[in-house]
Image: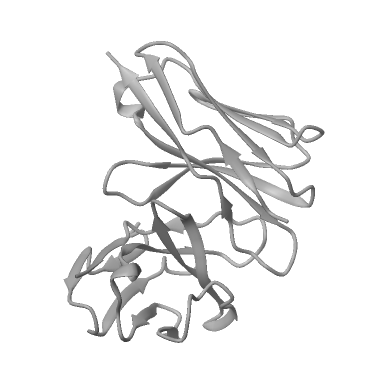
Amino acid sequence: DAGVIQSPRHEVTEMGQEVTLRCKPISGHNSLFWYRQTMMRGLELLIYFNNNVPIDDSGMPEDRFSAKMPNASFSTLKIQPSEPRDSAVYFCASSVQGSNQPQHFGDGTRLSIL
Amino acid sequence: GEDVEQSLFLSVREGDSSVINCTYTDSSSTYLYWYKQEPGAGLQLLTYIFSNMDMKQDQRLTVLLNKKDKHLSLRIADTQTGDSAIYFCAESMNTGRRALTFGSGTRLQVQP
């Protein structure tokens, strides 16, 4: 079975550019999560969706970050404009909705903003 | 508030048992998880335990939960070099907010 698929795996871009990260959740999963991992702050939730609807975006750092889920099989996380402090590994995870359902993670996108 | 703590580093010899510890503060935690992260990879779910359980065993992995002390441990029997990775403890709660709260991760180094 295909797991959570993220693209690109690596992204290097200059500050000020727009960055779009993509995620395809596991088929049949209706909850999707975006996390960010840094050395300083560890793993932090940015936003999550249930049935394509954003439920909690309190972790989104600022207005430069936005996330969408236009359908059950695709989500994007966009940063515009990007800044060097956005450099991190961004993970997408999905699960079946329900508090006892484990989250399955993609391999992440390693983002470097120069 | 939510807080999950782990020791940063553990070194063991191949064939020994490894015990990775985790403490959490939120008594409303319902599920506790162990994830493994290898270099350059995502988080792989290893196992999880419901808060009304004391122990769960799955092949070489044993999870122990002391709910009174809010202490969770992961024991890996017969540790192999392939077990070298960062291990994350995470909790979730039976509330509206479904996100996982992660510890900082324990780097396990297995020496041959």
Residue A58 place in picture, x, y as percent: 59, 75
Q: Nearer the viewer, residue B11 or B112?
A: B11
Residue B11 place in picture, x, y as percent: 40, 20
Q: Nearer the viewer, residue B8 or B21?
A: B8
Q: Residue at x 60, y 40 (%)?
A: B5
Q: Residue at x 79, y 52 (%)?
A: B28
Residue B22 place in picture, x, y as percent: 61, 35
Q: Residue at x 50, y 76 (%)?
A: A60
Is residue A79 placed above or below A9 in the rendered structure? below
Quadrant hosting residue A112: bottom left
For the rendered model, the colour scheme is one colour
Which of the image's four quarters has the C terminus of chain B? top left
Residue B44 place in picture, x, y as percent: 41, 46
Q: Residue at x 41, y 69 (%)?
A: A25
Is residue B26 placed above or below B49 in the rendered structure? below
Quadrant hosting residue B72: top right
Which of the image's four quarters has the N terminus of chain B? bottom right
